[in-house]
Amino acid sequence: MNPPQFHFFILFFLFLLPNHHHHLVSAIDILTPGTPLTKDQTLISLGGNFELGFFNPGNSNSWYIGIWYKRILPVRTIVWVANRDHPLTNSSGLLKIGELGNLLLLDEDSGTPVWSSNQTKDSNTVAQLLDNGNFVVRHQDDADSADFLWQSFDYPTDTLLPGMKLGWDSKTGLNRNLTSWKTANDPSSGDYSFVLDTSGFPEIFLTDKGIRIYRSGPWNGLRFSGVPEMKATGPVIDFTFVTSKDEVYYSFDMRNNSVYSRLVVNYTGFLQRFTWIEDSGVWNLYWYARKDQCDFYKECGYYGICDTNASPVCKCMTGFEPRNPQAWYLRDGSDGCKRKHGLECGSDGFLTLNNMKLPESSTAFLDSSMSLSDCEKMCRGNCSCTAYANSDIAGSGSGCAIWTVDLLDLRQYAAAEGGQNLYIRLAASDIDQTSNVGSGTDSNGNAKRIIMIVGIVVGCAVVLSLVTIWLVHRRIKSQREKRSAINYKGPREKSQDLLLKAPVTLSKREYSGESTTEEFELPLFDFSTIALATDNFSQANKLGQGGFGSVYKGTLVEGQDIAVKRLSKTSGQGVEEFKNEVRLIAKLQHRNLVRLLGCCVDAEEKMLIYEYMENKSLDSILFNQEKSSLLNWQSRFNIICGIARGLLYMHQDSRFRIIHRDLKASNILLDKEMIPKISDFGMARIFGGDETEASTRRVVGTYGYMSPEYAMDGIFSVKSDVFSFGVLVLEIVSGKKNRGFYHVNNQLNLLSYAWKLWREGRGLELLDSTAGEKFDSYEVMRCIQVGLLCVQEHAEDRPDMANVVLLLRCESAPVPNPKHPGFILGRRPDHTSSSSSKQDESFTVNQVTVTIMDGR
């Protein structure tokens, strides 16, 4: 019996069963001209993997035809939407095979077409939902995939499934790409797209309203050169990239068909790969981009190399220097680098850069048949050639890619991470100064090198001696001059010498008892520069004060606003904070962490210079009745997600695992766009790669944010920060402080009050009335539930920040029910002295951090 006859037999049989007719008819996988699909019916693929039908997201009044996983419950994970930009305004829709053999979605009340597939000009067609999630229109008697008349896989929405192709097809003229939903509850076309650029050396871009914000790097035979994680997929996923005259596309397949995986462009601008974990019933975030600073497109400009293992992350390669030195030393590398010496075509050489993400490649020349040596000869013979590389690194390498433009979006990985060799054209004078060169770069032999090296060593020794003498003399003179600098009242004069372009060296660093010596490339500001910038540290410029000292606003002579953290000379605690903060923040680069511009160390003066945050600290707005209305729900949600991303970077994605230990509202700063920045790393600790927790006899932190195990036993871990984050989430939602908040009738602190409301199904009552009337109630409840998960009493029950980010941003990820929160930090009024209560009611921009000396 052929397939059409078989399905006809099933339909005939089902119509003979009136008691179960409706339920069973909805379980077929084929739509025929005589059996349209209504709102109460669905198609189910033959193997039961996928289901197609009508749905309305969230509390929306709009209806859509979509495809979702049948076996994944209770959360419905939508993978394709037919009429994403043409919703039905009511539930009376009808999906049918039209007279021209195409799919038609009609408003049943008016009979008006809302959406249709392309015309097939063949009336003898059926539509079938396949078990791979593809919805196809085909001839009734022809199930060959090569003869499909139309398929949903050619018109993806935000999700790439196994077997789907992302890219160009010359036969259909289609360039298939992914486009995000507009919001979590609106599947219409959003701002973010994942698009394959087929020109030059093909690669994929993530765009925001058409502007490129992330680049995969070209396919190098094994993986995209900017996605080294693709080599570590093991026995799970097979990746395919095809380049031919007929098509250019990327796709993936699962080695085990029982494992579900999907690649999604999220409406918040992230590219995410999820895999379904059957045992735990959750979508696991398997991989995502953009995950660090170097994932941002053009982060270090032309010829600048981005390296997350360096500090700062942007560096110029040999033979190049910053195009904008002042911005560069203030850690803005977007202007990139420029050549120190011009190229002279006949005598140029090549610099070998290892473990590289290849540069932006839309204009690159590509020849898959050439060897690397032939590629070098072609590049050497073309005076416009700026770099070359193997186009395929499989085996011993093959193929040729040549760039004839300025190189953009370069990134270098650690040796174990991936990347490939890239050969950069350099002037002969620059090649002579480096030993990191490729073939054909040395025309004078080893003798010249030896003579040059000896000369350099001798010259350096002489220069070093002179510099040492000069520094000693300058130090003595400087100490005399700086004592009177604070009394300087003269006019501000612009001087490029006010910022000393020298790295700061801090020796004998202590990390968990180990002594090391490191150098951080932090700009060293002259004391008089800071005195001028802050108007001699005037009270008018004072932003706040803490246990470490005071913070002042300043303006450099170039016009840049800064925040100056000046260590108090009488603060013993502040000295350790200062050292610790320089140790840590110099290593951290993330858009949700405050940026350290430099420091000033001069005699007894120690200062840290930060980027200035126009909206000051979160607590100064959130807990201020007159200002809290500035934070509507969308702003609050964005702040929560930004803090979560910053913590995830500290815990997982940075060079070191950093535990903040003093996360609180006053340590979250807001820039002019209300983007949150985690600040104050004076209490932070570095964990080793295999460390999960540690203990201390000196408990530091702030009441109301400390986890129970840390406050009581001095045990801290990433889960300590997770607890503090959970408190912050509940504070941001409610607009109330955890410490000092007591529910009138129940004498509950904020955590127990939120727990009570959530258990009673009244969680929305926690939302601050000043957050406005426009909010997504599902999103608010999700945040409250995530906050309660983070403040659970036992550390092992709390999620890590990777899961927190997933739960906040992925609507389809199921949120577990929280257990009892840790109430250890909540005191009732009768346990608190009047002086303490009074102190709780006062709140400054820089809340004092307490240190508890454990007497054990």
Image (cartoon, rainbow, N blue to C red):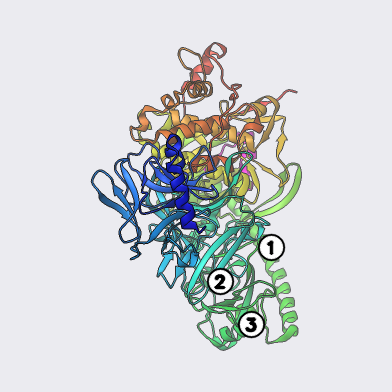
- Magenta part of the chain: 565-583
Residue closer to the observer: 211 or 263: 263
Asked if the residues shown at circle 2 and circle 1 are in contact, with their CB atoms under 8 angstroms apart, the answer is no
Report the residue at 66% width, 76% height from top.
437
Query: Does 527 appear above or below 426?
Result: above
Q: What mark, if any, has residue 179 been given in the picture?
A: none
Q: Is residue 538 visible?
A: no
Q: What mark, if any, has residue 320 been given in the picture?
A: 2
Q: Which of marks 3 and 2 is in front?
A: 3
Residue sitting farthest toward the left: 110
For label 3, the residue is 371
Horizontal side of 665 relative to 521 (left or right) equals left
Q: Which of marks 2 and 1 is nearer the N terminus?
A: 2
Residue 522 rendering spot, x and y as whole percentages:
58, 54
Horizontal side of 776 relative to 803 (left or right) equals left
For label 1, the residue is 415
* Label 3 secondary element: loop
Amino acid type, label 2: Phe
Residue closer to the observer: 718 or 663: 718
Can you say which quadrant of the picture contains the C terminus?
A: top right
